[in-house]
């Protein structure tokens, strides 16, 4: 039932835009494989073979560390309502930090967020859809305000200190390249 495509088609783009969350999967050369759920208004499809997403401060920073080791990334969306569908994009990704060339242009695509840690720019090599028949129905209620409340209670220096303490290494002890 899985189908592969060389690029995103209009129906894929519409499906992505309709989802409230996505998942990112990465792995280094050794160690743990990471899969993280992402939400908020943090992803943009920029073309048939390009997706960018803004990564906000979190308790870990596996994606950044993995991409420093092995430049590959999978993004996945699944429908929790309407017709069942899973969509994945496979490719490579560039990591951008504040001050890097291209950061300002890409950051302007998103709502301003003081705890924006990286922007990932994925070059898509393969798009795959599959049935999603086993994905349960779930109803979206709202975005969480927990991240914004946390950020509002911190100064910029406190956010950077958190990055230094919690986000400088992967769980396997590899560097993440996060600026502090």
Image: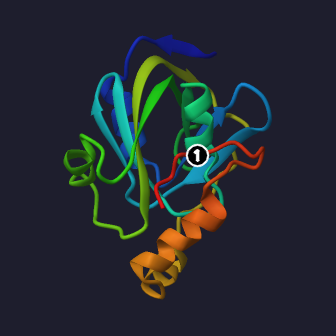
* Residue at the disc numbered 1: 176
In percent of width and height, residue 163 lies at 56, 64
Does 40 sit above or below residue 169? below
- Is residue 135 something one can see in this rendering? yes
Does 123 sit above or below residue 158? above
The quadrant of the image that shows the N terminus is top right
Residue drawn 51% across the image and 12% down it = 4
Asked whether, in this view, residue 34 is left or right of residue 37, the answer is right
Asked whether, in this view, residue 137 is left or right of residue 100, the answer is right
Q: How many residues crowd around disc 1 within 10 Å: few (fewer than 14), some, or many (20 or more)?
A: many
Compare residues 179 and 14 and report the one nearer the observer.
Answer: 179
In percent of width and height, residue 171 lies at 76, 49
Compare residues 12 and 64 and report the one nearer the observer.
Answer: 64
Residue drawn 40% across the image and 76% down it = 156
Residue drawn 63% across the image and 34% down it = 26
Does 40 sit above or below residue 11? below
In percent of width and height, residue 115 lies at 43, 67
Asked whether, in this view, residue 58 is left or right of residue 10, the answer is right
Element on which disc 1 rests: loop
Image quarter of residue 33 = top right
In percent of width and height, residue 130 lies at 60, 24
How many dots with numbers?
1
Identify the coloring.
Answer: rainbow
- Is residue 86 something one can see in this rendering? no
As drawn, the residue found furthest toward the bottom would be 153
Compare residues 149 and 156 and report the one nearer the observer.
Answer: 156
């Amino acid at each position: 039932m899985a189908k592969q495509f060389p690029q995103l088609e209009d129906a894929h783009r519409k499906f992505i835009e309709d989802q409230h969350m996505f998942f990112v999967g990465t792995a280094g050369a050794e160690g743990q494989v990471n899969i993280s759920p992402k939400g908020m208004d943090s992803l943009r499809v920029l073309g048939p073979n390009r997706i960018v997403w803004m990564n906000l401060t979190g308790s870990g920073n596996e994606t950044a560390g993995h991409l420093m080791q092995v430049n590959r990334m999978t993004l996945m969306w699944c429908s929790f309502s309407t017709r069942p569908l899973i969509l994945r994009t496979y490719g490579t990704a560039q990591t951008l930090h504040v001050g890097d060339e291209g950061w300002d242009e890409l950051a302007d695509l998103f709502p301003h967020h003081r705890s924006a840690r990286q922007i990932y720019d994925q070059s898509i090599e393969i798009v795959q859809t599959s049935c999603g028949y086993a994905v349960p129905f779930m109803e979206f209620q709202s975005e969480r305000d927990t991240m914004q409340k946390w950020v509002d209670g911190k100064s910029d220096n406190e956010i950077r200190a958190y990055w230094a303490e919690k986000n400088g290494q992967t769980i396997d002890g590899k560097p993440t390249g996060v600026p502090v």
